[in-house]
Amino acid sequence: MYDFTEEELQRYSRHILLKDVGVEGQEKINNAKVLVIGAGGLGSPVILYLAAAGIGHIGIIDGDVVDLSNLQRQIIHTTKDVNYSKALSAKEKVNAINPHVKVTVYQDFLRAENAMDIIKDYDFVVDGTDNFPVKFLINDACVKAGKPFSHGGILRFEGQTFTYVPGHSCYRCIFNAPPPKDSVPTCSQAGVLGAIAGMLGTIQAAETLKYFTGVGELLTDKLLIFNAKTMDFRKISVKRREKCPVCGENPTITELIDYEQAACDLQNH
């Protein structure tokens, strides 16, 4: 049972007023542990909204430093943070927004050798990365560990997201394997409208809060795609594949894999 102070009751009053959330739902939020992988374009709004909502423990993993080109979309960082650790910069903003939130920082990149050890302590994982190799690594690690996660991807004017919960379709059910190296551009190569990161990141934050409170329907077995040029949103139904190499009946991927990635991918989440 979470013992709210008067200050916390006031801080979270707009959540508590919601019939579908209330004190019980806020208590679930405050007891939640979420790992955000990447403190960049997607991770920025995710971290900010989860901290404001009162998620009890937020883990932030990012081995990069803030670059001036990041500031167009990575709103958790400011000009004074240039050349400073993204993970530490994000932690400072969380502390400023909500001192009740515990923050664990990993100044590192997610890799096959550290993924399972890092995600084991969290209830939910948010993918805020910008390259296919790590997205597949996140998926495979979460499926193996039985951890739900929110996938997110942005490029130019478009975004896509879905939520994985054990027993439902995973990322490999939709996209079987990473595309060949350099066959698909990243944001650092093709560009991205900064606000797109905010649009998708807030959706991921909402999915995270919905997961813990049990409010509404999650984006499980559905891929949400939007185009900001036209403001068209559509959901595509997807199915769990029996022959999926990681979540299928006879998985062929039994160990985590570090796929090759373009060098620029490491610098511009």
Image (cartoon, helix red, strand yellow):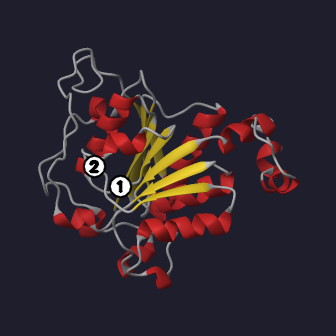
Kindly give the residue lying farthest to the right in the view shown: 6
Q: Nearer the viewer, residue 241 or 112?
A: 112
Regarding mark 1 in the picture, which secondary structure is present there? loop
Quarter occupied by the C terminus: bottom left
Regarding mark 2 in the picture, which secondary structure is present there? helix
Q: Residue at x 41, y 42 (%)?
A: 119
**Where is residue 52 shown, x and y percent of the image?**
66, 57
Q: Mark 2 points at which residue?
A: 134
Q: Nearer the viewer, residue 2 or 164?
A: 2
Q: Is residue 62 left or right of 199 when viewed as pictured?
A: left
Say which quarter of the image contains residue 100: bottom right
Badge 1 crowding class, 10 Å Cα cut-off, few under 14, some 14 to 19, many 20 or more, is many
Task: Look at the numbered discs 1 and 2 and tell me whether their residues touch, using CB distance below 8 Å.
Answer: yes
Callout 2, which amino acid?
Val
Task: Give the Cα separation between the discs numbered 1 and 2.
Answer: 7 Å
**Where is residue 226 shown, x and y percent of the image?**
43, 49
Q: Residue at x 63, y 32 (%)?
A: 216
Q: Can residue 180 be seen in this view?
A: yes
Q: Which residue is drawn at 58% across and 49% down?
A: 57
**Where is residue 186 shown, x and y percent of the image?**
26, 61
Callout 1, which amino acid?
Thr
Q: Name the residue under label 1.
A: 129
Q: Nearer the viewer, residue 87 or 203?
A: 87
Quarter occupied by the N terminus: top right
Badge 2 crowding class, 10 Å Cα cut-off, few under 14, some 14 to 19, many 20 or more, is many
